[in-house]
Amino acid sequence: MIRLLLVAFLFFSLSTAQAQAKRLDVMSFNIRCGSCEKPDDVNHWDRRKYLVADLIRKQQPDLIGLQEAEFFQVRDLVAMLGDYEWIGVGRDDGKEQGEANAVLFRKARFKLLTQETLWLSATPGQIGKGWDAALNRTASIVRLRDRDSAQELFLLNTHFDHLGQQARMESSKLVVGLVKSMTGKLPVIVTGDFNYTRQFAGYGIVAELLRDAEQVAASPAQGGTISFNDFGKSIEPDKKIDFIFVNDDVEVVSHRIITDRYQGRYPSDHYPLQAELRLR
């Protein structure tokens, strides 16, 4: 009897560990550039960074795709959070100049296998603007391995242009092409600020290959229909321009727009998204 109980306990423990290894909490968060507000502004990064860090700490994501992240902002967050490693390059020089689409991952859980940053343009390997874009735009791609389960996955984090309509269309095609080129039958997750809603044709291009986590979640999506809030100045229904997409090797358990505020203050001009995923 004791032996049977021991076997049952070991089997339960192994099954639980495997289930936990396949569970993944992913966040996409445009944190608003740290140099965009004047030092005396209530929304200046020196005041907001504690709110951003607290929100992330409460949600405990395993992977985070940050948009509009300047290097000093990412360093501030990593120092406050302590659990993450990160990759990313500045969009203006491929080093530290300009905003980065940084990817943060729990260092105790994941081993970084590969990393790459490409520019959203007709020449992705070269620094520069694409099509009618107002600014340089990039996509950061990482391949990670779970240290416990040995499961590998890809995460692509991006930020499309806010003015160039053609750029947003072509960037959608480029992202689809990048996902198709990823080697092996592995889970793929795409996070980003796409600067368009589901009504824009570019959304359909991405959604033809990938699934919108909000739309396919097993439980009803939470948090409303707004991801861009402009620090509370632009609360328009159906203004969701941030998305988490997944391929067929990822099951979406839940999806939420996190609308937390701190005594009326907004951590960013975007609400973050978070999805609970399970890798198949």
Image (tube, helix red, strand yellow):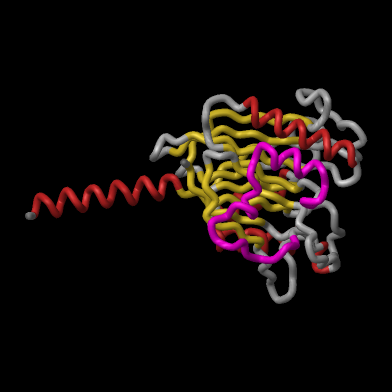
Q: Is residue 234 above or below residue 264?
A: above
Residue drawn at x 92%, y 35% is: 132
Q: Is residue 33 visible?
A: no
* Viewer-proximal residue among 171 and 147: 171
Residue 46 x %, y %: 74, 60
Q: Is residue 16 above or below residue 138?
A: below
Outermost residue toward the bottom in this view:
263
Residue drawn at x 17%, y 48% is: 7
Residue drawn at x 72%, y 43% is: 71
Q: Which residues are magenta?
A: 197-226
Residue 38 x %, y %: 87, 59
Residue drawn at x 44%, y 45% is: 22
Q: Is residue 231 magenta?
A: no
Quadrant containing the N terminus in the rendered view: bottom left
* Viewer-proximal residue among 129 and 178: 178
Residue 220 x %, y %: 59, 63
Residue 232 x %, y %: 81, 68
* Viewer-proximal residue among 106 and 244: 244
Q: Is residue 207 magenta?
A: yes
